[in-house]
C-alpha cells in the first residue's frame, strides 16, 4: 500500500516499545476550506465562529493508495460526499517528556 502524508508535518509511527517503525514526510497539505466571522471579543481579543466547507488539496481515491490527513479533513470529505475508506488520521499519540506530540502508535479510519 502506498501511504501519502497530506498533513503539514512528518508523521512518526512507534511500536509499543517506543521504537520508530515508520516515518512519513509531508507530501502536500489537504485541509478543509474555512471561513470565520467575528462574533464577540474576550478581553479585547476577537472571538470568531468558524465554519468549514469542502476539502482542499485532497486527491480523488486511487487504488492502492492511503492518505494520512487531519480529522477535520476527513469530516469535510464526509460532508462533501467523498468516500473515506482511503483516509486515515493518527491515533495512540506518543509524547516526549515535555508532553509534546512526537508521533503515534496507530492510524485510524472514520
Image (cartoon, rainbow, N blue to C red):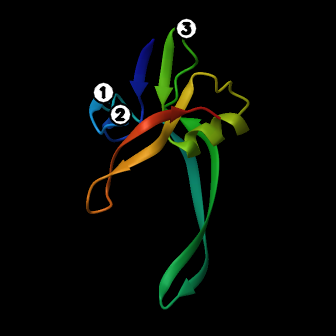
- Along the line of sight, the residue nearer the viewer: 5 or 60: 5
Mark 3 or mark 2: which comes first in sequence? Answer: 2
* Mark 3 crowdedness (10 Å alpha carbons): few <14, some 14-19, many ≥20: few
Secondary structure under the numbered disc 1 in the rendered image = strand
Quarter of the figure that contains the C terminus: top right
Q: Circle 1 is placed at which residue position?
A: 21
* Mark 1 crowdedness (10 Å alpha carbons): few <14, some 14-19, many ≥20: few
Describe residue 80's horizontal placement relative to residue 45 as left or right. Answer: right
Secondary structure under the numbered disc 2 in the rendered image = strand
Single out the residue that lies furthest toward the bottom: 43
Describe residue 94's horizontal placement relative to residue 91 as left or right. Answer: left
Give the distance between the C-alpha atoms of the residues marked 1 and 2, in whole angstroms.
Answer: 6 Å
State the image coordinates of residue 96 (x, y, percent, origin top left): 27, 54
Q: Quadrant of residue 26?
A: top left
The numbered dot on residue 63 is 3
State the image coordinates of residue 8 (x, y, percent, origin top left): 36, 41
State the image coordinates of residue 18 (x, y, percent, origin top left): 29, 39
Mark 3 or mark 1: which comes first in sequence? Answer: 1
Q: Circle 2 is placed at which residue position?
A: 13
Q: Are marks 1 and 2 in contact (CB under 8 Å)?
A: yes
Give above or below for 39 relative to 22: below
Q: Mark 3, mark 1: which one is toward the viewer?
A: 1
Q: Residue at x 63, y 23 (%)?
A: 85
Give the distance between the C-alpha atoms of the residues marked 3 and 1, in whole angstroms.
Answer: 24 Å
State the image coordinates of residue 71 (x, y, percent, origin top left): 56, 43
Q: Mark 3, mark 2: which one is toward the viewer?
A: 2
Give the distance between the C-alpha atoms of the residues marked 3 and 2, in whole angstroms.
Answer: 23 Å
Q: Residue at x 72, y 39 (%)?
A: 79
Give above or below for 109 relative to 61: below
Amino acid at each position: 500500500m502506498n501511504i501519502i502524508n497530506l498533513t503539514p508535518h512528518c508523521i512518526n509511527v512507534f511500536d509499543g516499545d517506543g521504537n520508530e517503525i515508520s516515518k512519513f514526510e509531508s507530501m502536500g497539505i489537504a485541509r478543509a476550506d474555512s471561513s470565520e466571522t467575528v462574533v464577540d471579543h474576550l478581553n479585547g481579543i476577537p472571538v470568531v465562529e468558524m465554519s468549514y466547507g469542502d476539502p482542499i488539496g485532497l486527491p480523488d481515491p486511487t487504488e492502492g493508495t492511503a492518505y494520512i490527513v487531519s480529522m477535520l479533513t476527513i469530516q469535510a470529505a464526509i460532508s462533501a460526499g467523498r468516500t473515506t475508506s482511503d483516509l486515515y488520521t493518527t491515533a495512540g499519540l506518543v509524547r516526549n517528556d515535555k508532553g509534546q506530540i512526537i508521533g503515534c502508535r496507530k492510524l485510524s479510519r472514520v
